[in-house]
Amino acid sequence: MDLTVPIGLFIGLFVGIVGGRILEGGNPLFLLQHTAFIIVFAGTLGAMVFGARSVDILNFPAHFRKVLRQPEINAADLIPQLVRFAEKARREGLLSLEREVPEAQDAFLKQGLQLVADGTDPDIVKTILSVQLERQMMRHDRVAKMYEAGAGYAPTVGIIGAVLGLIAVMEHLSEGIERIGPGIAVAFVATIYGLVLANFILFPMAAKLRLRSEEELAIRELILEGILSIQAGDNPRILEERLKAFLSGDERKAYEASKGQTKGT
């Protein structure tokens, strides 16, 4: 699990919003207004449904799981696997990679190995995998934009909720200040809900999804480079050095350390 998600929500919502309310001497439970909640969340959801594809809306649980989870595959784990495939291809030929397809951890890697094992022309392999990467990035960008659009709707819907609350207050002007004051306060809770939904949930979710997309793209670019090098018959050691270029400085140190430990055992 990516702990930055619950930690960020705790700091923003409970330390920032609830803590600020307590420091002002107010009752934080006053922020729990079901009418404002329904107006803001239902209104924002309705606008998002109107402006997005149904498949993207229905995939919200999958998007949320992606936000919460750390990437299952990292570059440091893939490099030794690709080097092993390269060594086997040089010893036994490209056709031998077909037996390795079931062991591949990633669907993109499986597809690339199968194409190579089938004797597909290198240019066609590169075209197929590159187009798949491009389409993947377009899908990920579309989903992130959906949440960014929702973050744009939410504050406006919050203002609508506040206006509705003020209309309700105006209907009771004759009942005295005792009724008007709390009513105005309740009305502005909808504005808070809209801003919180936008800036603590939807915008951060879109940003995290873009980050996950960048991480996945980097992994798949590494796989593509490895697949094309294996098909070209490159030396496994040269391939390893080429793939290590995808690692950050810290990742490379950790990779070299783990490699040294493996040799020591």
Image (tube, rainbow, N blue to C red):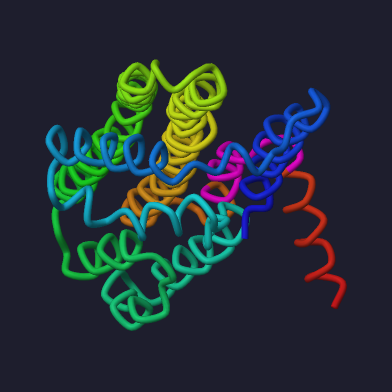
x and y, in percent, of residue 170 in the image: 34, 16
Q: Position of residue 241 (x, y in %)?
A: 60, 44
Q: Position of residue 61 (x, y in %)?
A: 36, 60
Foreground of the two, 178 or 167: 178
Residue ranking furthest to the right: 264
Residue 34 vertical position relative to residue 204 in the rendered view, above or below:
below
Q: Quadrant of residue 127?
A: top left
Left or right? Give the position of 227 relative to 6: left
In the image, is residue 206 above or below residue 174?
A: below
Towards the viewer: 252 or 21 = 21
Q: How many marks?
A: 0
Q: Residue at x 44, y 29 (%)?
A: 190
**Quadrant of residue 187 within the rendered picture:** top left
Secondary structure mainly formed by the magenta segment: helix
Relative to 166, is 47 above or below? below
Question: Residue 151: percent from the left, percent from the top?
Answer: 37, 27
Q: Which residues are magenta?
A: 239-250
Q: Residue at x 37, y 25 (%)?
A: 165
Q: Nearer the viewer, residue 142 or 32?
A: 32
Apparent side of residue 249 relative to residue 34 in the rendered image (left or right): right
Q: Residue at x 44, y 46 (%)?
A: 34
